[in-house]
Image (spheres, helix red, strand yellow):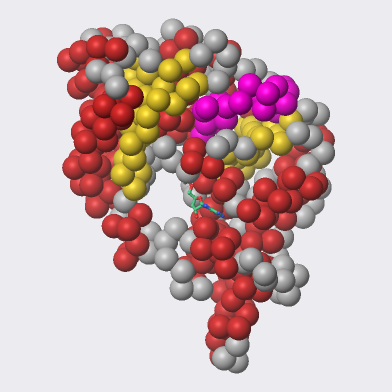
Amino acid sequence: MILGIESSCDECSASVLQSSPTRALEVKSVATFSQIQIHQPFGGVVPEIASRNHLETINPMIHQALSKAGISYSDLDAIAVTTCPGLVGALLVGVSAAKAIAYAKQIPLVPVHHLEGHVSSLFLDADPKTLDTLQLPCLVAVISGGHTHLYVMNQWPEEWPLEFLSSQLVARSRDDAAGEAFDKTAKLLGFPYPGGKWLDDHAKGGDPSRFALPRALPQKSVLDFSFSGLKTAASLLIQDLTKKNQLEEEIPHLCASIQEAIVDSLVKKMFLAIEKYNCQSLAIVGGVAANSRLRERLENESPVPTLFPHLKYCTDNAAMIGAAGYFRFKQGRALSTEDLLTLNASPSARHAPGRALS
Ligand code: KG4
Ligand code: ZN
């Protein structure tokens, strides 16, 4: 039985998981306070406001997760907490809470890299039959508001070396993340933050080929992504349509065209990576895994079986942190008392204590 804690950005979340005889983990409870509404007036996450809200909600979320699962601290075998990467003030709230509980109740504590959490979301409440289609090597795409990373997973999580993320990274965005591209272009169209879901919804019924938008780095030899040019092109197009008083009528087509440009780049590079690394399956995790057009295109075009976590585990949540922590716990990676007392949060991808993971 493991308690996961996540506070790296704008979701304050706690979750209780139980291991099973298979690799799948049973989620007993999740309690999440989303700060989206609080940050919406600012058009993005305000770090100081995020930390202050985490401070107010962390204890209630932990208590709720334990009570929903019907357990108390004494039933826990371990606590897992996100230590990096993220907003450092926000991370510190979760890390401090986890340290205090672990020390006071003498429960082993496992530091978790947020991106290992996203990858581990594949195993949450997973149907064993679905997991059977996850053959190694598997290309895992972490596509979120902060990252667009492709990893070749050729070992199961309980066998991952500490430097799994840095050693298996085969492609990344050179500038904006895919989720950021959704959010920034959605903002230009006047949608609230985070705009990915709004753009997805408003693209329904739109013509994805109405506007020609750039697909950067088209060379087959390049697996990396780039999305900042798309934002500039979309901005110029929106200005032009506004001048002609045509913006309103073109919204569905504009949304569909922007979405298609992002999804098209993602799909093309993922297929190139699958071929290059001879991957037997594809897994998509992170907030953008919720995108309906990405799911539709992969369903129709993917050359290998494709897996997604349950929709509710795509965006940030503590269950995925608990899962990653469980796999590391099984490797004996819980901290010693001395390391527990000096554990710190890191805004960059540095894995505490003192281990670099990109
Ligand atoms: O994984 P996540 O919750 O947070 C990070 O770790 O960044 O991902 C949030 C991102 C946001 O950029 C959001 O706009 C995007 O996921 N997102 C979507 C959709 N739902 C969430 N993007 C496109 N289509 C969606 N349906
Ligand atoms: Zn995330």
Q: Which quadrant of the view contains residue 181?
A: bottom right
Q: Position of residue 341 (x, y in %)?
A: 23, 17
The reply to whether residue 11 is in sight is yes
Asked if 151 appears above or below 295 in the picture, the reply is above
Give the number of callouts: 0
310 lies left or right of 319:
right
Front one among 194 and 148: 194
Please give the name of the residue rendered at 69% of the width and 61% of the height, measured from the top-left corner. Answer: 260
Please give the name of the residue rendered at 73% of the width and 75% of the height, measured from the top-left corner. Answer: 210
The reply to whether residue 350 is in sight is no
Q: Position of residue 130 (x, y in %)?
A: 67, 27
Q: Position of residue 42 (x, y in %)?
A: 32, 64
Asked if 280 appears above or below 197 in the picture, the reply is above
Front one among 87 and 209: 209
Q: Is residue 137 magenta?
A: yes
Q: Position of residue 319 (x, y in %)?
A: 43, 30
Q: Which quadrant of the view contains residue 169?
A: top right
What residue range appears in magenta? Answer: 118-138
Asked if 13 appears above or below 342 in the picture, the reply is below
Give the quarter of the figure containing the N terminus: top left
Q: Is residue 33 magenta?
A: no
Asked if 138 appears above or below 162 in the picture, the reply is below
Please give the name of the residue rendered at 57% of the width and 17% of the height, measured from the top-left corner. Answer: 23
Please give the name of the residue rendered at 74% of the width and 51% of the height, measured from the top-left corner. Answer: 297
Front one among 174 and 295: 295
Q: Residue pushed farthest bottom?
A: 244
141 lies left or right of 322:
right
Q: Which quadrant of the view contains residue 239?
A: bottom right
